Image (cartoon, rainbow, N blue to C red):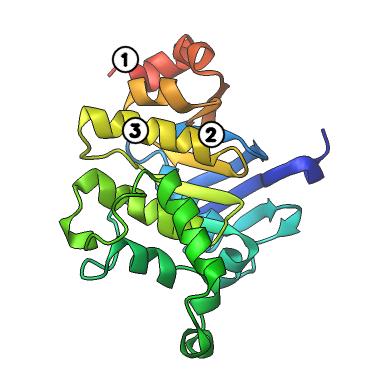
Amino acid sequence: MSNTDFALAVEDLTVSFDGFKAIDALTLYIDRNELRVIIGPNGAGKTTLLDLICGKTRATGGSIKFKNEEMTKMAEHQRVRRGIGRKFQTPSIYENLSVFQNLEVSYPAGRSVFGALAFKCTDEVKARVQVVAEDIGLGDKLGTEAGLLSHGQKQWLEIGMLLMQEPELLLLDEPIAGMSARERELTAELLQRICKNRAVIVIEHDMEFVKRIAHKVTVMHQGKILAEGPMDKVQADPKVIDVYLGH
């Protein structure tokens, strides 16, 4: 398979903070429409890797190609425009706006100041909001003020706000933290739905959840990749048991 076929090709990626290599010559390939889960002990560099992919942190060396275009010199907003969406651990939704309005303001046409002024809620936007709301399980909550949603529903709304931009790569950092068992189940279904037409990278600690959703698992340790493959293969790997699952 040539590198041009991947949604994301990370090669020899390195980032140093004060001489400490947080990410150390890491290489990772993500297929189109793949749901990849990254696991590993705290301090393994998982969140830093997402920061590098979305442009929040600049790489010291190596290459990040998204749809075969080099990203390492690109600013964060340029990467968003290219189709990379990132959800951080704490949801950033507009608590006092309705679910509908949260999704509406996330539509790409509203992104620049001029765009926001010239922006009308067109039928196209309404249709997109409806589709996304169904996708995230909030189709019947469009009129609800976002601040009144449950913790899980707020997380889904934030994923929806990213989906409004139709990203081709979605980065999610611990999306089920603090959720009830039922919300976790619904989130697993949600993630399986949304990776039908985009690549999704999830960082997660909950092994049952990982088992449920992952097409493939990458185990990180000390800024490097320790193991990679289907969950059952990774779980049985002595190196992984030693540094991670054994504790």
Location of the N terminus by quadrant is top right
Q: Are marks 2 and 1 in contact (CB under 8 Å)?
A: no
Residue 49 seen anywhere in this rendered image of the structure:
no
Q: How far apart are labels 2 and 1 at the CA level? A: 22 Å
Q: Position of residue 97 (x, y in %)?
A: 26, 70
How crowded is the residue under tag 2: few (<14 C-alpha within 10 Å), some, or many (20+)?
many
Farthest-out residue, right: 2
- Residue drawn at (46%, 27%) of the image: 213
Q: Report the front residue among 104 and 2.
A: 104
Query: If the image is split into quadrants, where does the C terminus sit?
Result: top left
Q: Residue at x 68, y 45 (%)?
A: 7
Name which residue type carries label 2.
Arg
193 vs 121: above or below: above
The residue singled out by tag 3 in the image is: 186
Q: Type of residue at label 3?
A: Leu
The residue tagged 2 is 36
- Locate residue 120 relative to residue 199 in the image: left or right: left
Q: Amino acid at mark 1?
A: Gly
Q: Label 1 neighbourhood size at 10 Å, few (<14), some (14-19), many (20+)?
A: few
Q: Are marks 3 and 2 in contact (CB under 8 Å)?
A: no
Disc 3 vs disc 2: which is toward the camera? 3
Which is more toward the observer, 130 or 229? 130
Q: What secondary structure is found at the residue carrying circle 3?
A: helix
For the point 19% across and 47% down, the residue is 150
Q: Position of residue 118 (x, y in %)?
A: 52, 89
Q: Which residue is mark 1?
A: 246
